[in-house]
Image: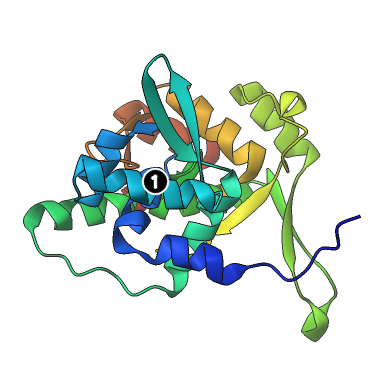
Amino acid sequence: MDVRTEADVAHVAAAIGDPSRAKVLLALAGGGALPASALAAEAGVSNSTISGHLAKLLEARLLTVELDGRHRYYRLATTDVARALEQLALIARPLPVRSLNADTRAKALLRARLCYDHLAGRLGVAVMGALLEKGILAAEQTGAGAEATDITYVLTPLGREELTAFGVGTERLPRRRASVRFCVDWAEQRHHLAGALGAAFTARLFALEWLRHGRYRRVVRLTDAGREGLATAFGVPVDQVT
């Protein structure tokens, strides 16, 4: 029987630590799969160079590869990789903005983006706050007073009813994944909704065409119908965050 030892953090950190490989991982942080040529463009390297970077990320189990005929598509290995990237962003210095296009992209990412398969940015944090305010989610802490430690969120009976009516099948959420989780949003330093519920809620927003993919990778934008719908259905203060 294998004995679990300390995690080899250095090995994973080394794989992430190269700027080009970090750009590859961030390009995939929206949950999609991309070919090597697209990842080379994102990383700013040649097609011949990207193969070595992808091999290192595969070896570190940060990526998986999918075959479609003669084509190979890469994606993040698990949702935990996306969560780790989000957490690293909390302590990382911001990259310098050197062009108008980079400035526009950075501002769009701050407003609303995908964190793997769920909503993040100012809009994601505002949605989380509205769900708590409306009683759809409830916060729970371990311990009390000065002894309080970890915070968790639970879906309330009211929330189950409200979200089912909204078209989010809470009874059909994947059992292999925690239903209600959160990420600490790297830009807002507050929580946005993750887990199976966060993914299902975001998928419903796309299905309703309240959300659409934006001009830049990972960026999403709220449509006019989405602005009205989120404000009416959940009290999200969309005018303050988008």
Question: Residue 196, percent across and down?
Answer: 65, 37
Name the residue rendered at 24%, 56% in the picture: 106
**Which of 150/234 is in front?**
150
Badge 1 marks a residue whose secondary structure is helix
How many numbered discs? 1
Q: Residue at position x 85%, y 74% from top? A: 143
Report if residue 30 is visible in the image. yes
Seen at 49% across and 67% down, the residue is 13
> Compared with residue 142, is residue 173 higher up or lower down, i.e. above or below?
above
**Three-letter amino acid code at disc 1?**
Leu
Residue 30 sits above or below residue 164 on the image:
below
Task: Residue lying at the far right in this picture: please name it.
Answer: 1
Residue 51, image quadrant: top left
Where is residue 102 drawn, in percent x and y?
A: 16, 55
Q: Residues within 10 Å of mark 1 (few under 14, many from 20)?
A: many
Q: Nearer the viewer, residue 15 or 89?
A: 15
Dividing the picture into quadrants, the one containing residue 195 is top right
Q: Find disc 1 in the rendering and name its residue.
A: 54
- Residue 202: image x %, image y %? 51, 34
Extreme residue in the left direction: 100
